Image (tube, rainbow, N blue to C red):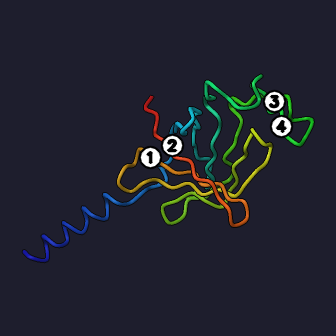
Amino acid sequence: MKHCILLIISCIFVSSSSISPDTYIGKWKITGGSVIEIYQEGKFFYGKIHKRTEKPISNLNGLDNNNPLKELQNRPLLGMIILDKLVYEDGALSGGTIYNADSGKSYNVKVWINNDDKNTCYIRAYKSVLFKTFEAKRVNN
């Protein structure tokens, strides 16, 4: 009986603290107002701009103006993939890049979900040893 109770308690703990790949799929509103939709294709995860902030700091015309490639500067930001080729490993998404349309630069990225609140995730962009972390909240459809 003692072992049975211990087994039940450990199963509850393990299942409540685990983050599955499906937990990442959905829309996430980043502090500042933009909404990113994360989805999976095969083993990779991607994120595209679903909605822009109401007060953008650049690209006021809704186009990728700051892209270093001239031929991409007229593409619309809405629907554009900004999280590219992330892989699920050890409860987090990593190994891919994030594109910053404000600067036209890409950075290595890691995305993880708060174990205590599965409706909060963090997106961390890395530039060498420096990084910036953004908080995002799940958007319910």
Instruction: State which tag comes first along the sequence, 4 or 2.
Output: 4
Residue found at x 68% / y 59%: 126
Which residue in the structure is indicated by mark 1? 120
Q: CA distance from mark 1 to mark 3?
A: 30 Å
Q: Residues within 10 Å of mark 2 (few under 14, many from 20)?
A: many
Q: Nearer the viewer, residue 103 or 88?
A: 103
- Compared with 13, 28 (above or below) is above
Residue found at x 57% / y 35%: 32
- Compared with 61, 140 (above or below) is below
- Compared with 36, 62 (above or below) is above
Q: CA distance from mark 3 to mark 2?
A: 25 Å
Q: Are marks 3 and 2 in contact (CB under 8 Å)?
A: no
Where residue 107 sits: x, y (%)?
72, 54
Lateral position of residue 127 relative to residue 6, left or right: right
Name the mark nearer the viewer: 1 or 3.
Answer: 1
Name the mark nearer the viewer: 4 or 3.
Answer: 4
Lateral position of residue 2 relative to residue 76, left or right: left
Q: Amino acid at mark 4?
A: Asn
Q: Amino acid at mark 1?
A: Thr
Which residue in the structure is indicated by mark 4? 66
Tell me the SS state at disc 4. loop
Q: Are marks 1 and 2 in contact (CB under 8 Å)?
A: yes
Which residue in the structure is indicated by mark 3? 75
